[in-house]
Image (cartoon, helix red, strand yellow):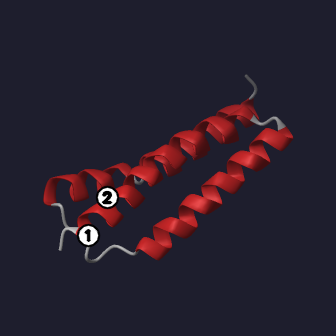
Amino acid sequence: MDFTEIIGLLAGTCVTISVIPQILKVWKTKKVREISLRTFSILTFGIFVWIVYGVLKKDFPIIITNSISLFLNLIMVYFLLYYEKEK
């Protein structure tokens, strides 16, 4: 693994884990009123496009970190849809 891949993994890891506190807060409180579904939907789509880009470029740091990020953001979108429905 070269230096640029390490930097890519570090950057991707920071972006990926940034959503975890929000997921945990929603999971504990079951409150999503202040969170934008539109924002998380656009973000999730953007992450999907990054994965496609990573596959096309054969860039494993982009593929790996964005795949994990996609999974986490899909959890958040699910929570937004599920807990909004419970109102």
Residue 7 horizontal side relative to residue 20, left or right: right
Crowd class of label 2 (few under 14; some 14 to 19; many from 20; radius 10 Å): some
Q: Quadrant of the N terminus?
A: top right
Residue 80 pos. (x, y %)? 33, 65
Amino acid on which the number 1 mark rests in the picture = Lys
Is the residue 86 above or below the residue 58 in the image?
A: below
Disc 2 and disc 1: Cα gap in Å? 10 Å
Crowd class of label 1 (few under 14; some 14 to 19; many from 20; radius 10 Å): few
Helix, strand or loop for disc 1: helix
Helix, strand or loop for disc 2: helix
In terms of sequence position, does the residue under pointer 2 or pointer 1 come before the other? Answer: 2
Amino acid on which the number 2 mark rests in the picture = Phe
| Outermost top residue | 1
Which mark is drawn over residue 85?
A: 1
Name which quarter of the figure residue 33 lies in.
bottom left
Q: Nearer the viewer, residue 71 or 3?
A: 71
| Outermost right residue | 57
Residue 10 pos. (x, y %)? 57, 39
Is the residue 23 above or below the residue 6 in the image?
A: below
Is the residue 67 above or below the residue 50 in the image?
A: above
Instruction: For residue 7, say whether it is visible.
Output: no
Name which quarter of the figure residue 81 lies in.
bottom left
> Residue visible at 64% across and 61% down?
46
Q: Nearer the viewer, residue 81 or 41?
A: 81
> Residue visible at 29% across and 61% down?
82
Q: Nearer the viewer, mark 2 or mark 1?
A: 1
Q: Nearer the viewer, residue 55 or 17?
A: 55
Instruction: For residue 41, say whether it is visible.
Output: yes
Q: Quadrant of the C terminus?
A: bottom left
Residue picked out by circle 2: 79
Residue 8 horizontal side relative to residue 58, left or right: left
